[in-house]
Amino acid sequence: MSIEIEILNGDASWKLAEPLFDAVWPPHVVKASPWAGIVFANPDLRVLVQDTSGDVVCHGGVYQRAITCNGRRMRAGGIGGVLTRADTRRRGYATLALEAAIRTLKDEGSADFALLFCAPDKVPFYTARDWKRFDGEIYVEQPSGRIRFDAIAPYVHDIRRAPRQGAMDLCGLPW
Ligand SMILES: CC(C)(COP(=O)(O)OP(=O)(O)OC[C@H]1O[C@@H](n2cnc3c(N)ncnc32)[C@H](O)[C@@H]1OP(=O)(O)O)[C@@H](O)C(=O)NCCC(=O)NCCS
């Protein structure tokens, strides 16, 4: 199947991505997930992999955020909402979307490192793609206030920096 990869404004492209989210993460799936009840940020950009009919078969959200890591200001390139429609998995689409997201962060010079959060069953997928565990504490904002975020584990893809431990404050909602 021939595909197209586009990188679009996050808010403007939500309608294109929404059917994929509804299919992969319907409310009952989210409710049973480790991140149930967490309020997440909306992505600044979206990587969309589309098939020839224009349907989005794979998505990756991209976030650009000034954070602090061990008290130092840094720029994190967040990646979240990586999902592929069930009938188009194991064709390399998520790998392509991740590569496009990282290339975008590098091209824009907007990130010292990339950061994502993943459930235990997806850890082998990311570690096989050069993502390294951040073995420290993550703090985020929620409507209830600032909390330690440990529902899902943080993984880093090094760009200019390679944070591995300590305390990171995302200075906003998680992704
Ligand atoms: C995790 C997820 C995004 C992966 O999407 P995907 O498009 O199937 O990912 P890829 O095709 O790039 O890679 C998946 C596997 O297929 C393999 N693969 C890629 N192309 C292939 C091909 N042509 N033939 C056979 N296998 C192939 C990859 O090597 C990879 O194997 P690995 O996990 O052993 O490394 C998808 O399973 C998903 O949407 N899951 C539900 C949502 C979710 O949990 N998202 C992650 C949140 S952290």
Image (tube, grey):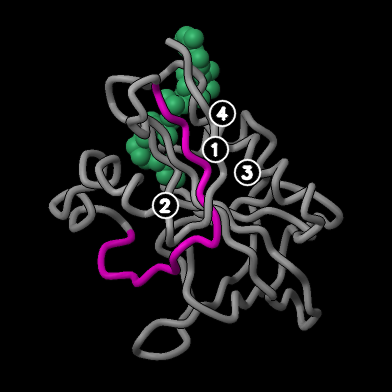
Dominant secondary structure, magenta: loop
Residue 101 is marked as 3
Q: Which residue is mark 2?
A: 13
Q: Position of residue 140 (x, y in %)?
A: 51, 78
Marks 4 & 1, CB-CB < 8 Å contact: no
Q: Magenta region: which residues?
A: 35-51
The residue sitting at 66% across, 58% down in the picture is: 77
Quarter containing ligand 1?
A: top left
Q: Is residue 22 left or right of residue 124?
A: left
Nearest to the eye among marks 3 and 1: give it: 1
Identify which residue, 14 or 124, lies in the foreground. Answer: 14
Marks 2 & 1, CB-CB < 8 Å contact: yes
Classify 10 Å Cα crowding around label 2: few (below 14), some (14-19), many (20 and above): some
Counting residues from the N terminus, which is met first, the one under dot 3 or under dot 4? 4
The answer as to whether callout 4 falls within 8 Å of ligand 1 is yes
Marks 3 & 1, CB-CB < 8 Å contact: no
